[in-house]
Image (cartoon, rainbow, N blue to C red):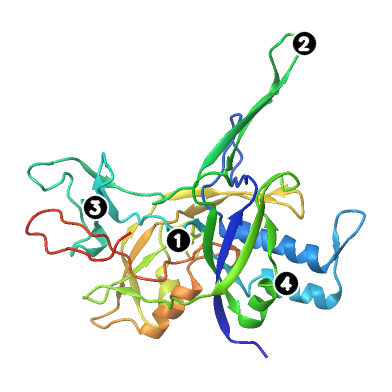
Amino acid sequence: MTSARAAKAVMLKLAEPAQLATLATSDQLNRTETYVPGWVVRGALANAWLTQHAVRTRTGRFDLEPDQRKQFVSLFEGNVRFSPLYAGGQLPVPLSVFGHKHEDADLSHRFDAAHEDDFTHPEVCPVDQCRQRIEGKRGLAATPSVVTRSSVVVGQDGTAVKGLLFSRASLDPRGGDTTFTGVIEGPSDLLGVLTSLSHVRIGGRRTAQGGAAVNFEELTQTPEPDVLKNGTLLLRLVAPAIFVDDQGRSLPHPSEAELSRVLGQQATVAKAWSRWERIGGWHVASGLPKHTELAVCAGSTFAISPGGHGSFDRDKVISLLGRGLGLRRHEGFGHLRQSPFAVKTQLSEGNSMLKETTL
């Protein structure tokens, strides 16, 4: 009998530097992500579970009993979803947010085009004393500290040996907020197994770095749909997502077929604010690079209109928020913001679009 689905808050605190790369580079610098992707969380917990429950053979492989293998597949091959972890719990800024090109600490000029009647934004700030250019915002409201270390092998001529001069960027546990938070969602009995894990290693070079403490807490927040007065549903990604059409071609937004199927009625993408990115990685178990996916980045926002003049069923919308969108959702792709988002903004004296919620 399958247990009821539940969710747990995940808190990961770095104890060592961590290098979280998703793509190979053509230069000498190995870069790092400034958040912990969901697939990294999944891999780290899988490795910690194997270390605790399985026996490593001389070849380096883990030897599992049939019951252990069945539980491993249930945990990490589809039944549990792993969201990305962000420093201080600060989710990425939605791509529907616009503001001054040159900003200072005052962000009161920002506004969310998803809340405008026609989903548009002005080219310049409408405040007469300002008139600064308006552009789209993206990225993280808070980023952790990153440290770059360089290594070089010097030849007999006193110069760097070709191919042996490189630098590696890593998240620095000594600076900034090094506690990353997110969510795991799945059957309650499987979540109970994962909560027994207290230490993981994330990223590359895990024999020398990537150590982190992890703990889990009950999730008190319940999903709350972001719905406009006219019934339009706003969906905002907090993780990259992979969208394809019926022929398997990449899409910059969720397919209307998927939305209609999950929501139980006709659904149309009225507007999309999205940006492409490529996602790769390294598969530790096989020792091979993962194939590169063309994905829509975190922060992408979609305005979804219901068919006819009706509205979406609230329970089905909440189910969609927990399910996510697109392909490879159990690997950390396609996670959605679980509560409404708005910015406090005053574009002009007579602006009626004053929002009370903050970033």
Q: Compared to 114, does 287 lie above or below?
A: above
Residue occupied by mark 1 = 238
Q: In which quarter of the image is the N terminus?
A: bottom right
Q: In this view, does 109 lie to the left or right of 204?
A: left
Q: In this view, does 212 lie to the left or right of 267?
A: right
Cα–Cα span, label 3 and label 1: 20 Å
Residue occupied by mark 2 = 156
Q: What element carries label 3?
A: loop
Q: Compared to 147, does 272 lie above or below?
A: below
Q: Which amino acid does label 3 sit on?
A: Arg
Q: Which amino acid does label 4 sit on?
A: Val
Sequence-first tag of 1 and 4: 4
Q: Quadrant of the C terminus?
A: bottom left
Residue pictured at 62% horizontal, 44% vertical = 19
Residue pictured at 47% horizontal, 77% vertical = 220
Cα–Cα span, label 1 and label 4: 25 Å
Number of marks in picture: 4
Residue 356, percent from left and from top: 23, 66
Which residue is outermost to the top?
A: 157
Sequence-first tag of 3 and 1: 3
Q: Is mark 4 on a helix, strand or loop?
A: helix
Residue occupied by mark 4 = 73
* Label 4 Cα neighbours within 10 Å, binned few <14 / some 14-19 / many ≥20: few
The quadrant where residue 341 appears: bottom left
| Whether residue 263 is visible | no
